[in-house]
Amino acid sequence: MDPIERLEAIEEIRQLKARYFRCLDAKDWEGFGDVFTDDAQLDVSEDAADLADAIVGREAIIELVARAVGEAVTIHHGHMPEITVESSDAASGIWAMEDHLFWPEGGPVRSMHGYGHYRERYRRTDAGWRIERMVLTRLRVDLDRPPRDG
Amino acid sequence: MDPIERLEAIEEIRQLKARYFRCLDAKDWEGFGDVFTDDAQLDVSEDAADLADAIVGREAIIELVARAVGEAVTIHHGHMPEITVESSDAASGIWAMEDHLFWPEGGPVRSMHGYGHYRERYRRTDAGWRIERMVLTRLRVDLDRPPRDG
Amino acid sequence: MDPIERLEAIEEIRQLKARYFRCLDAKDWEGFGDVFTDDAQLDVSEDAADLADAIVGREAIIELVARAVGEAVTIHHGHMPEITVESSDAASGIWAMEDHLFWPEGGPVRSMHGYGHYRERYRRTDAGWRIERMVLTRLRVDLDRPPRDG
């Protein structure tokens, strides 16, 4: 593959993932959905070996994520990408991640602080590179729960 | 624009922003000032729509920042840049950020932990790319205040 | 130096450092060792001016690091690289870093949260770019110790 095309693909995929994080934390669900292919798969089941529990399709992904974190102030940051461009329209990547979630008072959890990795596949569509598969595994999650009454 | 020039500009701007963070946390005010244009604007007023409250000029920016954080141990990290090169001498960028500040004992705040985004403009000068406008907005700020006496 | 070769070297070094972090946190010691040259130097003595206290050699580095953090859940993230390619087979870099370590219950420290910078040198070997020198200095370290009995 041409080295310039390869470097351009890596940069476009980095900015694609940046939009994923920014739109997620801004609760910009239209922008968030736009980073995925129509048929994208999202697996947060921690069973990365198989995608049996994956959510399939852009609309289902938006619905799941908006329901899970729509009420929270969320901070998601990605780090240290390892992006492999396999051809002019297929690529894969690994990203370290850290997230902080803060829910409104009165719920069962006040905040969450987690760490993990995304393993992803990308496909180049007519609109540019998009995420077609995202598998999230975690190294650790800390929850801050409110003290119980009584 | 030539694709190699574009990739080189993006890389130079990433390293420019890296110097911004490193010099800020090292309290290297000369190095910190050097990342800005002479007429740079800094707006941390959280009113990104208008730059009415912006600090203007490299010297004023150094003075403000050195006064605000000069006594603290500070950690500022940037993440997930979305850099758009508009021409050979103009570019814009969005960065996620996270900061931790730790003040000496005895003050009104012990530490601060914040999250937000920089929205920036860059200009290529004879000395290379420089920041000409920086607007910081925040998603969340947590303050740790000492317990009150009595 | 050819601009494309320079950009490719920077990208390869970024992915090299990403493997360093990912293998370290996965406790993949074979993958971890592979990011270093045979004769690599590691200095975490906080005395960056001189390498008198450096650990020398890939095997010694693996042994030291595995002993120090092998029992802990560790999170290491790098940020904001400033990579300078000096020639086709020599480069240097600065990285901001943040780490979180969590030890099993019963030890003298429950967790650690630190911040600092790596200053590194890279050499291109027949197998690709490798780390030949790594010096870590810290801006701050917070330790969480368990309360004492009695």
Image (cartoon, coloured by chain):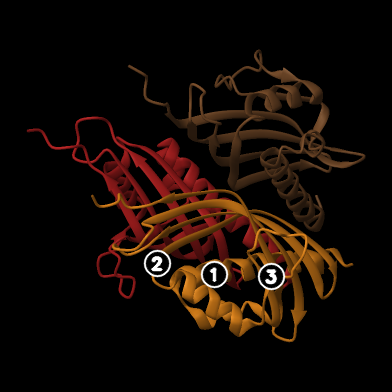
Chain colours: A orange, B red, C brown
| Res B89 visible | no
Front one among C47 and B138: B138
Is C110 on the left or on the right of C74, as rendered?
Answer: left
Q: In this figure, which residue is indicated by the disc labeled 1?
A: B90
CA distance separating discs 3 and 1: 46 Å
The numbered mark at residue A53 is 3
- Disc 3 packing (10 Å; few <14; some 14–19; many ≥20): some
For badge 1, the amino acid type reads Ala
Which chain hosts label 3?
Answer: A
Is C73 on the left or on the right of B53, as rendered?
Answer: right
Whether the residues at callouts 1 and 2 have beta carbons within 8 Å, the answer is no
The numbered mark at residue A72 is 2
Front one among A83 and B131: A83
Q: Residue at x 65, y 14 (%)?
A: C53
Whether the residues at callouts 2 and 3 have beta carbons within 8 Å, the answer is no
Q: Residue at x 77, y 64 (%)?
A: A50
**Same chain? Circles 3 and 1:** no
Identity of the residue furthest to the right in this view: C126
**Residue A25 against residue C35 in the figure, above or below:** below
- Disc 1 packing (10 Å; few <14; some 14–19; many ≥20): some
Q: Secondary structure at mark 2?
A: loop
For badge 2, the amino acid type reads Ala
Is B112 on the left or on the right of B13, as rendered?
Answer: left
Q: Secondary structure at mark 1?
A: strand
x, y percentage for residue A128? 71, 80
Q: Secondary structure at mark 3?
A: loop
**Residue C81 against residue A20 in the figure, above or below:** above
x, y percentage for residue C128? 86, 43
